[in-house]
Image: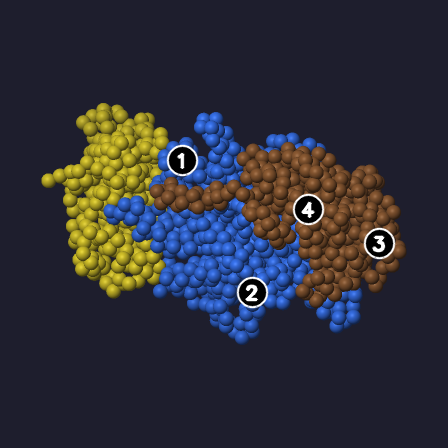
Chain colours: A brown, B blue, C yellow
């Protein structure tokens, strides 16, 4: 290497390694699978109130988990936030998290939305109900996820691909409830009900249903909420054509998953991290989730937003969400076998 | 050329351990670390996952990936070669604008163009809705091309990747001696026959080189196919890794992908070898372009403007529309830091990639042993590997190195170094280099190939030392190639997403990350500002690139 | 005064392969030498060793009395003051003719550079092309620019590596003559490498024949043709035929063409079998002669016919005859020998390694 390029390399090393060195004392370092725009405002509020600076990297949960694992005991991260319980459970199994024994947290986060040993706590709830086109579907004919294989719904269902974690979780919850064999039979029949091969995201399913391509869309509620409050007239119009049906209300309840947080085992700012965790489940923060993102608060004593309240109360599947993580690979295989694209 | 046999020095089969070969080898090995790390998972037992994959989805992955490659190949060849021929060899109104404008689609990331086309042409999009409103038709009453399909994905990728073929085949057409073409015409071949029988075969190596770049990008694409619900090798790798939680099987899928890439590289090498035969004539005349008549001019104009319309104006227009009408996000001061971060990263990576490509290219030129040739090939492998895979391949060894160093320092001195490189921009830029070195390497090598060894020897016999040869002979001759290499990598890094997402330090965002975070939250309109800014920042280097190429041609023909 | 170039026992190796084997020769100032041989004979390697691009495995090379190459020590080409012209000309495409020519003239002032360029361009008859780029020139013009670029810094010696092989045939012969005139006018010492003997004869004062890396003969064109040092040289240069003969007492030789005197190329004694080299011009057509041979082949060469004649025992001879003597194949014509000494090589019984080298 020429002296010039050596010099450049040295300069770059100094310039580029700087960000990781400048971590001051009053900080908490956060790896978040929750997108920046959906977490940053809360973090800013936390910093304002406590004076603790929050350093943030966002990314996909698996990649962040991989990063945590390879960084080992020297990881700068104090906390990991993911948008599904399965990933949190995976992190716990990988041994990169630590338990938090906080009476406050245990008091406000219901048991099924946190790790039994306190390795992770749910922060917000997302529900994945059945959305139907008001004009063409009589909601009294809807009952459960399981009943969607009824010939009634042949060629009328829009749902995204099985590569998405929302669908993987949904199927995993069904394996937990009905067993693998029954779920496989169901999935095979379910795939035949699709109005088109799965493509696009949840909003696309809602749009397709509104446009008449299908009559039922499976999507998370906050996408519907986002569309209803969109600046785009077309999106508002499309979303307005659909309504929410809460399935399995007579049985186990509608499928939900949580976004949640865990403290890393090697984190160096444990106290600050716990403060952040507690901050994220306080009433204001919980209300913010509901308001800003159309999610349901994880706390039972915080009301969801007006829009969400309009969809009615519903029974939640009380399955311990760690199960979703355990069953996720089974769910993926099952969907592979069923030919769910 | 027969009598060259006694002056040709055969490549030596033994490794001569001089400075160059050691330097080149160690550099190349360093750059190959991520690929090797990923490949090392091959030896981990993947369990019965393979049987599961083979029984269910593997066939889909293979068939879809192949179909996608075929589709993209057809698309980029049709678009790239025809526009290259028209702008370099024919005279028609608008030619001089198309000359540079045809490169603009390069500035648009594939996943962004996929979002915009879906927004426009999807069943629920404005185009189909308008059709339904006018006609009163409903779903199933009419046929409309399904944009989110494998054909759609191939179309999207072809639209943004054809500039590679355009760029390289145009250079080849411009470099062709007009005499060969004239000879063909005097033999009674019309311009069309001349094109197919003479110009096209002569430009083949360049076209194949462009095609292989486009296909490698296609194989590495994740954003578009994932959004369109097309299962390819790349989506399969992630599904296996994340969904099935089986890293070993995912790495084995990556290894299969690498095999395809190897095959592509060999194909490209074989066709490039022939390039040597093609440029024996050193006599070039200034080009006289075919004058097209009115009908032909209209056709030419339509072809070029079609590529530009669908590859650039439509998606950019959609982004602009979203940004102006429906976006809730707006420009703020944070945006400025996004832009500076992005430009700084792209700038650093492109300069470093250029320096590395020069080192490796010179190393190979200086020391043409199998070890250097192999090393240089190895260093260029990263281009076809999905960015996420590279990122994981960078993250693991960097963290391992940092932790090992930390443990050692703790033992020896009792204090901790923490993570020195992991989670810094060094790791990120390194990943960029691994991923994009192939681009600059290919360009620099092509440039170096034009400097014949005798040119160096003449200079030395005229009393010129090595440094001076580089300054007075190589640099002026390489100028165009270096600029091209720099700009291509710059634009590539500008658009890069997966590695940036995984490896970036705390509080460090780029335009691509911002666009992705909003788009993946299905807020396409809000993503439009960031996406549009990527395009705007990308346009400048693209125009510079085009001017560099045109200028280097003009300098030759004055 | 030392010779301009001295090559002493020089050997060049690529790995274990010896490509130049113990070559020695000298070149006086102002003389044009030529290394001639079939491809693969090592001539280019030898030239590159003289230029400094290849190290010597053995021996030494002296330029103007200065020792420039020794095993383990090779003075860099840029420090030797040699000019080199390559087969592909290697003109710099990014430089004009002027800038190409002054490439090696950095040490002199701009004005002198200009003067030198004009002078050299005039010398090769290309004045006025200063501002052209190489690709705008014809092949012959490019060749001449490459030549004067190498000559511009007045090198100790000019090395020309197959300088005409990139050109078409007519141009080659014309240029070879011109280049000789130019070199002579400038008094340049030069070495040419070629596989084309006509080029060598046209350009060089002295010719070295290389075969299998060894210098077979270092001599004038005439001697190389008429007095080849070995069988390899005899067969590589010119045309001719070998006829068998037998050594008589007293050193004369008996053959199908009668008894003649010979230059022996080896120890001999009466009774030995030898082979005699007969060039086409050694045999003269003479209608008066009683010695008649049958024509078995003929080639029209303009001024002459080259007849192939057959002896009784089937041995074939070549004979050049003025072309107005037009005889048909199958005719028998009278010939006589026009040579007092023929060159005799060992007969087939003692075949030397030289035979294997035949092209």
3D distance between C-alphas at marks 2 and 3: 42 Å
Most extreme residue toward the right is A140
Which one is in front in this view, the residue at disc 1 or the one at disc 3?
3
Q: Is residue B287 left or right of residue A209?
A: left
Q: Are marks 1 and 2 in contact (CB under 8 Å)?
A: no
Residues at marks 2 and 3, common chain?
no
Asked if residue A183 is positioned above or below residue B112 in the image, the reply reads above
Q: Which residue in the protein does label 1 denote?
A: B22
Count residues near mark 3 (Cα–Cα under 10 Å), then give few for <14, some for 14-19, many for 20+.
Answer: some
**Tag shown at residue A154:** 3
Chain at tag 1: B
Q: Is residue B176 left or right of residue C344?
A: right
Indicate the position of residue C14 as horizontal and vertical percent values.
Answer: 34, 34
Which element type, helix, strand or loop, lies under badge 1?
helix
Q: Residue A166: tell me if it is visible.
A: no
Q: Which residue in the protein does label 2 denote?
A: B308
Indicate the position of residue C250 as horizontal and vertical percent values.
Answer: 18, 27
**Tag shown at residue A281:** 4
Residue A328 occupies which quadrant of the picture?
top right
* Residue at the image position 64 percent from the left and 36 percent from the top: A97
Indicate the position of residue C161 as horizontal and vertical percent values.
Answer: 29, 46
């Amino acid at each position: 290497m020429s002296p010039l390029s050596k010099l450049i390399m040295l300069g770059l090393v100094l310039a580029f390694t700087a960000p990781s060195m400048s971590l001051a004392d009053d900080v908490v370092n956060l790896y978040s699978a929750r997108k920046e725009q959906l977490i940053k405002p809360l973090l800013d509020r936390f910093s304002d109130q406590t004076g603790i600076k929050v350093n943030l990297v966002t990314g996909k949960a698996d990649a962040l988990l991989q990063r945590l694992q390879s960084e080992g005991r020297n990881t700068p991260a104090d906390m990991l936030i993911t948008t599904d319980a399965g990933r949190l459970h995976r992190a716990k199994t990988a041994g990169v998290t630590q338990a938090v024994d906080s009476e406050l947290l245990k008091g406000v986060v219901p048991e099924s939305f946190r790790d039994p040993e306190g390795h992770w706590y749910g922060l917000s709830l997302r529900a994945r109900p059945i959305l139907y086109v008001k004009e063409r579907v009589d909601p009294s004919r809807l009952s459960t996820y399981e009943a969607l294989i009824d010939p009634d719904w042949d060629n009328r269902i829009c749902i995204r691909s099985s590569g998405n974690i929302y669908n993987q979780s949904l199927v995993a919850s069904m394996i937990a409830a009905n067993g693998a064999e029954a779920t496989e039979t169901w999935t095979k029949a379910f795939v035949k009900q699709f109005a088109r091969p799965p493509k696009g995201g949840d909003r696309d399913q809602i749009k397709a249903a509104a446009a008449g391509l299908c009559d039922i869309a499976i999507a998370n509620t906050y996408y519907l909420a986002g569309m209803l409050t969109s600046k785009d007239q077309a999106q508002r119009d499309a979303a307005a054509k659909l309504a929410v049906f809460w399935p399995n209300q007579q049985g186990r309840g509608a499928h939900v998953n949580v976004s949640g947080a865990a403290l890393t085992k090697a984190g160096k700012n444990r106290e600050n991290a716990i403060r952040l965790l507690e901050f994220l489940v306080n009433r204001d923060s919980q209300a913010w989730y509901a308001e800003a993102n159309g999610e349901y608060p994880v706390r039972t004593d915080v009301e969801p937003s007006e829009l969400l309240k309009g969809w009615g109360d519903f029974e939640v599947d009380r399955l311990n969400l760690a199960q979703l993580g355990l069953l996720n690979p089974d769910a993926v295989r099952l969907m592979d076998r069923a030919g769910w694209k | 050329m027969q009598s060259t046999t006694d002056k040709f020095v055969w490549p030596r089969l033994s490794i001569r351990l001089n400075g160059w070969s050691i330097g080149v080898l160690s550099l190349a090995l360093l750059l190959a670390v991520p690929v090797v790390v990923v490949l090392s998972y091959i030896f981990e037992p993947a369990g019965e996952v393979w049987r599961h994959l083979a029984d269910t989805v593997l066939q889909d992955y293979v068939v879809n990936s192949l179909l996608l490659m075929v589709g993209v190949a057809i698309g980029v060849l049709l678009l790239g070669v025809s526009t290259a021929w028209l702008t370099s060899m024919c005279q028609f109104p608008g030619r001089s604008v198309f000359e540079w404008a045809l490169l603009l689609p390069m500035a648009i990331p594939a996943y962004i163009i996929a979002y915009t086309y879906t927004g426009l042409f999807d069943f629920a999009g404005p185009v189909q809705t308008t059709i339904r409103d006018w006609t009163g038709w409903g779903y199933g009453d009419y046929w409309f091309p399904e944009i989110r399909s494998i054909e759609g994905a191939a179309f999207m990728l072809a639209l943004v990747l054809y500039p590679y073929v355009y760029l390289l085949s145009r250079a080849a057409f411009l470099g062709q001696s007009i005499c060969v073409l004239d000879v063909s015409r005097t033999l009674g071949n019309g311009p069309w026959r001349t094109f197919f029988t003479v110009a096209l075969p002569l430009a083949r190596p360049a076209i194949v080189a462009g095609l292989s770049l486009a296909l490698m990008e296609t194989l590495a694409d994740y954003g578009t196919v994932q959004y369109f619900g097309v299962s390819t090798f790349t989506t399969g790798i992630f599904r296996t890794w994340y969904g099935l939680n089986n890293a070993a099987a995912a790495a084995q899928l990556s290894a299969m992908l690498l095999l395809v890439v190897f095959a592509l590289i060999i194909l490209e090498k074989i066709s490039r070898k022939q390039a040597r035969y093609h440029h024996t004539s050193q006599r070039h005349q200034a080009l006289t372009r075919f004058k097209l008549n009115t009908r032909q001019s209209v056709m030419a104009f339509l072809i070029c403007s079609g590529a530009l319309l669908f590859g650039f104006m439509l998606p950019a227009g959609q982004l602009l529309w979203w940004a102006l009408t429906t976006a809730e996000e707006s420009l703020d001061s944070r945006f400025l830091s996004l832009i500076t971060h992005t430009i700084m990263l792209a700038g650093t990576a492109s300069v470093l990639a250029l320096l590395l490509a020069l080192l490796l290219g010179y190393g190979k030129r200086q020391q043409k042993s199998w070890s250097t040739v192999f090393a240089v090939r190895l260093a260029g492998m990263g281009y076809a590997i999905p960015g996420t895979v590279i990122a994981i391949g960078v993250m693991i060894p960097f963290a391992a190195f940092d932790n090992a160093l930390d443990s050692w320092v703790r033992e020896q001195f009792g204090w901790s170094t923490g993570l020195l490189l992991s989670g810094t921009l060094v790791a990120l830029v390194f990943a960029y280099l691994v991923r994009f070195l192939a681009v600059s390497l290919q360009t620099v090598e092509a440039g170096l190939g034009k400097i014949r060894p005798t040119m160096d020897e003449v200079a030395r016999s005229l009393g010129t030392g090595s440094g001076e040869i580089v300054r007075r002979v190589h640099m002026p001759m390489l100028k165009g190639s270096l600029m091209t290499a720099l700009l291509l990598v710059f634009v590539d890094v500008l658009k890069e997403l997966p590695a940036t997402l995984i490896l970036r330090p705390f509080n460090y965002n780029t335009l691509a990350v911002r666009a992705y975070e909003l788009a993946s939250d299905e807020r396409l309109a809000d993503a439009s500002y960031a996406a549009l800014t990527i395009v705007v920042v990308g346009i400048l280097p693209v125009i510079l690139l085009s001017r560099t190429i045109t200028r280097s041609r003009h300098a030759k023909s004055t | 005064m030392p010779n301009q170039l001295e090559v002493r026992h020089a050997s060049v190796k690529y790995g274990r392969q010896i490509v130049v084997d113990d070559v020695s020769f000298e070149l006086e100032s102002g003389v044009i030498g030529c290394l001639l041989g079939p491809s693969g004979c090592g001539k280019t390697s030898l030239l590159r060793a003289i230029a400094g691009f290849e190290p010597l495995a053995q021996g030494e090379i002296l330029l103007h009395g200065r020792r420039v190459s020794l095993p383990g020590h090779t003075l860099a080409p840029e420090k030797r003051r040699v000019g080199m012209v390559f087969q592909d000309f290697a003109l710099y495409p990014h430089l004009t003719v002027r800038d190409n020519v002054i490439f090696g003239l950095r040490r002199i002032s701009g004005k002198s550079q200009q003067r030198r360029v004009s002078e050299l361009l005039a010398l090769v008859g290309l004045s006025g092309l200063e501002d052209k780029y190489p690709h705008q020139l014809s092949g012959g013009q490019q060749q001449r620019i490459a030549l004067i670029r190498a000559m511009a810094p007045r090198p100790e010696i000019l090395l020309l590596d197959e300088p005409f092989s990139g050109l078409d045939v007519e141009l080659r012969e014309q240029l070879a003559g011109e280049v000789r005139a130019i070199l002579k006018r400038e008094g340049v010492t030069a070495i040419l490498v070629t596989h084309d003997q006509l080029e060598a004869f046209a350009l060089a004062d002295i010719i070295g024949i290389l075969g299998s890396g060894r210098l077979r003969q270092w001599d004038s064109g005439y001697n190389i043709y008429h007095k080849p040092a070995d069988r390899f040289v005899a067969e590589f240069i010119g045309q001719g035929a070998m006829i068998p003969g037998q050594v008589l007492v007293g050193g004369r030789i008996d053959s199908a063409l009668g008894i003649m005197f010979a230059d022996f190329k080896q120890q001999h004694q009466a009774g030995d079998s030898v082979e005699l080299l007969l060039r086409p011009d050694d045999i003269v057509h003479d209608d008066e002669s009683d010695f008649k041979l049958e024509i078995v082949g003929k080639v029209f060469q303009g001024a002459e016919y080259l007849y192939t004649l057959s002896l009784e025992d089937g041995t074939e001879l070549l004979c050049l005859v003025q072309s107005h003597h037009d005889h048909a194949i199958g005719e028998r014509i009278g010939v006589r020998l026009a040579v007092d000494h023929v060159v005799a090589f060992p007969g087939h019984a003692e075949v030397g390694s030289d035979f294997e080298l035949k092209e």
